[in-house]
Amino acid sequence: MKRLLALASILTAIFVAAASAADISGTWKGTAENQGGTIERTFVFKVDGTKLTGETTSEMMGKSVITDGKIDGDNISFSITANFQGNDMKLTYKGKVAGDTIKLSVEFPGGGGGPTIEWTLKKA
């Protein structure tokens, strides 16, 4: 009986965590400032419980698939592999959902941590 109650508690906790995850499914348009100019990127998110997948497209780096995506409440994280000037690089995004806005940061790989870019996304 104790095992059954423990299992029920665990399942309830999992359900509550999944139910409280932000639903960001759909298309989002993002902008960021980089070296004195504005860059744009489109994100198409697909949410399944706490799992985040989809794709993202920019004029500078083309289309990339979203991998390793997670949603925990209003916090999101995911990675993409982008091609920049003929080189593939893995970029990891982390951010927070607030209504119809998502704030993301991504750190470019490289010596000393590389530059960080801050994105603001709006639901399209």
Image (cartoon, rainbow, N blue to C red):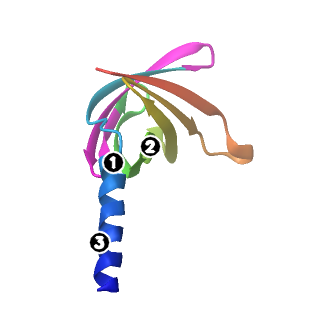
Q: Nearer the viewer, residue 26 or 57?
A: 26
Mark 1 residue type: Leu
- Residue most extreme to the front: 1
Q: Mark 1 = which residue?
A: 52
Mark 2 residue type: Ile
- Residue 106's place in the image compared with 124, above or below, is below
Q: Mark 3 = which residue?
A: 8
> What percent of the width, then of the height, locates residue 30?
41, 23
Q: Mark 2 = which residue?
A: 76
The structure residue drawn at horizontal position 44% and vertical position 43%, both measured from the top left corner, is 76
Is 38 left or right of 26, judged from the image as shown? Answer: right
> What percent of the width, then of the height, locates residue 110?
66, 45
Please identify, in this view, whether the residue under mark 2 or under mark 3 is nearer the observer: 3
Mark 3 residue type: Ala
- Which quadrant of the figure contains the N terminus? bottom left
- Look at the image and give the residue range highlighted in magenta: 33-56
Please say if the residues under marks 2 and 1 sit with CB atoms less than 8 Å apart: yes
Q: Which of the two discs, 2 and 1, labels the residue nearer the N terminus?
A: 1
The structure residue drawn at horizontal position 59% and vertical position 40%, both measured from the top left corner, is 108
Quarter location, residue 33: top right
Crowding near pointer 3: few (<14 within 10 Å), some, many (20+)? few
The structure residue drawn at horizontal position 33% and vertical position 48%, both measured from the top left corner, is 52
Quick check: is 43 in the magenta stretch? yes
Quick check: is 39 in the magenta stretch? yes
